[in-house]
Image (spheres, rainbow, N blue to C red):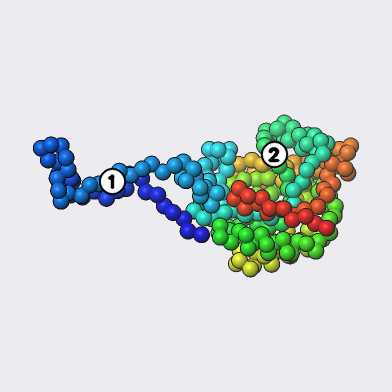
Amino acid sequence: MFLVNYSSSSEEEEGPAGAGPGVGPDGGVSSGAEVKSQRLPVPESVMGMFKDLEEDPDDSGKHDGRIRGFPHQRGNWSTLVYLEYYPEEEFVELIDLLLTHLQAHRLPMARIAEFHISLSQTVVLRYHWISIFVESLKEKMTSFDRFYCVSDKVKIYSNQEKTRTFLGLEVSAGSNYLLELVNEVDKSMEEFDLKTYYKNPSFHISVAWCLGDATAELGKHQQELQDIVDRFENSARALRMYADEVRCKTGNKIFSFPLR
């Protein structure tokens, strides 16, 4: 696919001073002078034709101070493979109990709006690779059956850059199925020379976050948080996840791969 760059009027080449069209006594253009054509404005519909070919540049002010782990570049799309988790009402109630406990100890965290279990690292995918990468994933996911997993172990995580800290619930049942999925996702990553997943992954659902490295402070309260989870009345049902499809989010596009 070829992209057409439309230059603005300020990009027009100007000739030397006095080289414009000559004007005769009658107001007409003198013979031998070149008439410079007027550039027509480009319609907005055309200017926006290729906006879906790239991600919007990051603005940390729009994301509560979060900073991406790699710089934005035209044609590069951040990509993640994951399982979406649709929580029961009790799940949100449990998370609010955990955050209230941390708030009481002056450790405020923000609840995450959407929940998932990652099956890949966040990688950079070129726009022209997307359709081929998606087909590769689709082919590999068709042989997997649906399954349940349970996330009920409180864990503290941070990103590799130590710019964000997460409160998570680690998977205690069903990790063997998740590992089989990751092995197939890794094969697709290797086809495009992209990073594979961690060697000994800790599958989990991140439920809250804060800026900076707060792992030491949060770690002091990990057992207290675990006790809250263990005592929660409906934890068995609230923390069980039904995995029926794998998703791939690349830029502003989401692709779904139903499991059997």
In the rendered image, is residue 89 in sight?
A: yes
Q: Which residue is mark 2?
A: 113
Question: Whole-percent x and y of residue 29?
Answer: 17, 43
Q: Nearer the viewer, residue 170 or 79?
A: 79
Q: Is residue 19 above or below residue 194?
A: above
What residue is shown at x 67% (from left), y 37% (from top)?
110
Q: Which residue: 53% across, 41% down?
A: 60
The tag earlier along the polypeptide, 2 or 1, is 1
Going by the numbered disc 2, the residue's amino acid type is Ala
Q: Quadrant of residue 102?
A: top right
Q: Residue furthest left?
A: 25
- Tell me: residue 44, above or below residue 204: above
Q: Which residue is mark 1?
A: 37
Crowd class of label 1 (few under 14; some 14 to 19; many from 20; radius 10 Å): few
Depth order, front residue of 50/217: 50
Q: Across the whole image, how many numbered discs are drawn on residues?
A: 2
